[in-house]
């Protein structure tokens, strides 16, 4: 296991433990970019069910995150978590989420629970699943040759 992967596992564990101990994140105040809106969740649902292809969902997600004026804290958190520049946070987040959902390692219901659940335990468990799969999907995309990556 490389140091970066081990460090990522430790970060995911620490974030998950923090969410579990402190209750749900204040996503109602500032959503994690525009991923909680109905249209975006429907697009991920359609990807999961095979009605949309990965490139289409990734392109839509990237366009929405680029157009999002708010969510600065969310973008900074994603940038730090995925070790990317702040301007690349939306692209990295979308690419990793699409990879995780498309490969069936993350269910859209987990994303919904993380972003929208009123139940602190459900939101905390979903946060752990989403963050773990987000991290590993991002890592796998970094290991993939750039000529094979999906680009909108």
Image: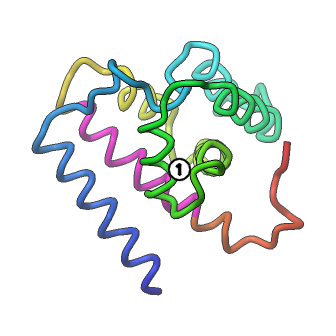
Q: Label 1 belongs to which residue? A: 105
Frontmost residue, 4 versus 118 = 4
Left or right of residue 147, residue 50 in this image: left
User: Residue 12 appears in which quarter of the rendering?
Assistant: bottom left
Q: Point out residue 10 in the picture as x, y percentages from the top left corner.
A: 30, 69
Examine the rendered structure and indicate whether residue 111 appears above or below residue 128.
Answer: above
Q: Quadrant of the C terminus?
A: top right
Residue 135 is covered by the magenta coloring: yes
Looking at the picture, how far across and down is residue 147, in whole percent? Answer: 89, 66
Q: Residue at x 43, y 25 (%)?
A: 31
Query: Outermost residue, left direction?
Result: 21
27 left or right of 134 in image = left
Neighbor class of circle 1 (other Cα within 10 Å; few <14, some 14-19, many 20+) is some
Q: Image height check: is 22 above or below 87?
A: above
Residue name at image x 63 percent, y 29 percent: 44
User: Where residue 47 sits: x, y (%)?
Assistant: 70, 32
Q: Is residue 17 magenta?
A: no
The magenta stretch spans which residues?
A: 122-138
């Amino acid at each position: 296991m490389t140091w970066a992967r081990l460090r990522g596992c430790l970060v995911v564990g620490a974030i998950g433990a923090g969410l579990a101990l402190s209750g749900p994140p204040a996503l109602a105040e500032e959503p994690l970019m525009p991923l909680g809106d109905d249209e975006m969740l429907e697009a991920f649902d359609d990807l999961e069910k095979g009605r949309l292809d990965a490139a289409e969902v990734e392109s839509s997600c990237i366009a929405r995150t680029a157009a999002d004026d708010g969510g600065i804290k969310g973008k900074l958190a994603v940038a730090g978590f995925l070790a990317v520049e702040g301007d690349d946070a939306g692209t990295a987040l979308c690419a990793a989420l699409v990879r995780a959902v498309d490969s069936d390692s993350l269910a859209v219901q987990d994303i919904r629970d993380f972003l929208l659940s009123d139940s602190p335990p459900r939101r905390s468990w979903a946060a752990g699943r989403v963050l773990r799969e987000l991290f590993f999907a991002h890592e796998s995309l970094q290991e993939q040759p750039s000529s094979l990556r999906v680009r909108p």
